[in-house]
Image (tube, rainbow, N blue to C red):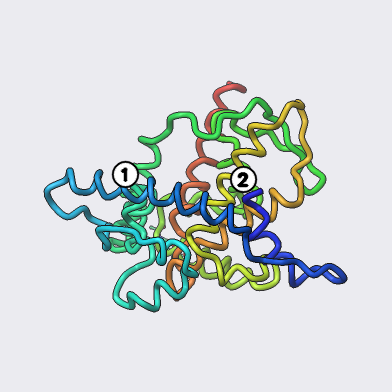
Amino acid sequence: MAWRALLCCLLAEVATAETASCSPSEDEETAQRTSFVQMAKHLEKHLESREAALPGVCLRSLSWEIYRKPIQEVLKDHPNYDGWCIYGIMGELFSKCAVAREVRQLVPFTDVIQKKESPMHLGRTQRFVLEGSEVNVDRMHVLDDLYCHVNGWYELSSEAASNYSYVEEASKKYCQSLEEKVPGYRTMSLADVTKISGENEDWLASLRQDLVHLPQKVSNGLLALGAAKCLMSGTGSAAICDMAHCAKKKEEKLMLQQKKLG
Ligand SMILES: *[C@@H]1O[C@H](CO)[C@@H](O)[C@H](O)[C@H]1NC(C)=O
């Protein structure tokens, strides 16, 4: 459901005979707006309860317009801010990435994500087939794991977990490779990102089998979520945080495997 708007935009360029409409229905828009207003209120309240300005949070409120506007255009409206900081009010996964980019150290981000290691996107299924090969994923963080796989970030060297220059270069390469892989990603807004994430969670919750072939639309959605990270700066270096996170996850997986073997 939430997929429709974005995916049809993404796939419109690929589609041949079908003419897809990219605007969400009126009901859908009203529902979106209502849940946005609730979220924005909650976020502002949280910020008001803090005395000092929070590092990595550049705007003290989030408007519906900013939420719905293509990320690229929002960045143009705030030329002196990093994208992660513009959306920093969304929470630490945004604001700490802004801080990491400012100090050119990955630790502020990787530390905070470590602390948040409570089960997210808990799934029953552990075995997935991606592009013909079977992978075992972390049942506590299924979507996170699939996201790292689909975007190819488990193939990064372990240096990506700690070496800022290394992961910055890797991000630039990744961001340059997107035009073909994720057509249309440049018009994505934060609302699109939220929609895709919600749809992924619905899909995960609906799974009943032990072994699941990753559907193309889920795979496309995970690619789009990766691509959206590239929009957070004009230089293609903005995917560093998620890449570092995936590299760190890979290290932990290897350690766990060795423990099991030893
Ligand atoms: C970090 O990565 C860069 C770029 O790949 C490399 O030149 C540098 O030697 C690395 N630094 C460390 C401390 O390994």
* Residue placed most toward the observer, 255 or 78: 78
**Toward which corner of the image does residue 10 lie, by quadrant?**
bottom right
- Please indicate whether residue 109 sits to the left or right of residue 218 in the image: left
Q: Secondary structure at mark 2?
A: helix
- Please indicate whether residue 193 sits to the left or right of residue 86 in the image: right
Q: Which residue is mark 2?
A: 199
**Toward which corner of the image does residue 64 lie, by quadrant?**
bottom left
Residue name at image x 66 percent, y 48 percent: 1
Q: Secondary structure at mark 1?
A: helix
| First in residue order: circle 2 vs circle 1 | 1
* Residue placed most toward the observer, 104 or 188: 188
- Residue lying at the far left of the rendered structure: 51
Say few, some or many: other residues with alpha carbon within 10 Å of mark 2 (under 14 / 14 to 19 / 20 or more): some
Residue name at image x 34 percent, y 68 percent: 82
Say few, some or many: other residues with alpha carbon within 10 Å of mark 1 (under 14 / 14 to 19 / 20 or more): few
Residue 107, x across and y down, in percent: 33, 49
**Toward which corner of the image does residue 179 lie, by quadrant?**
bottom right
Q: Which residue is mark 1?
A: 42
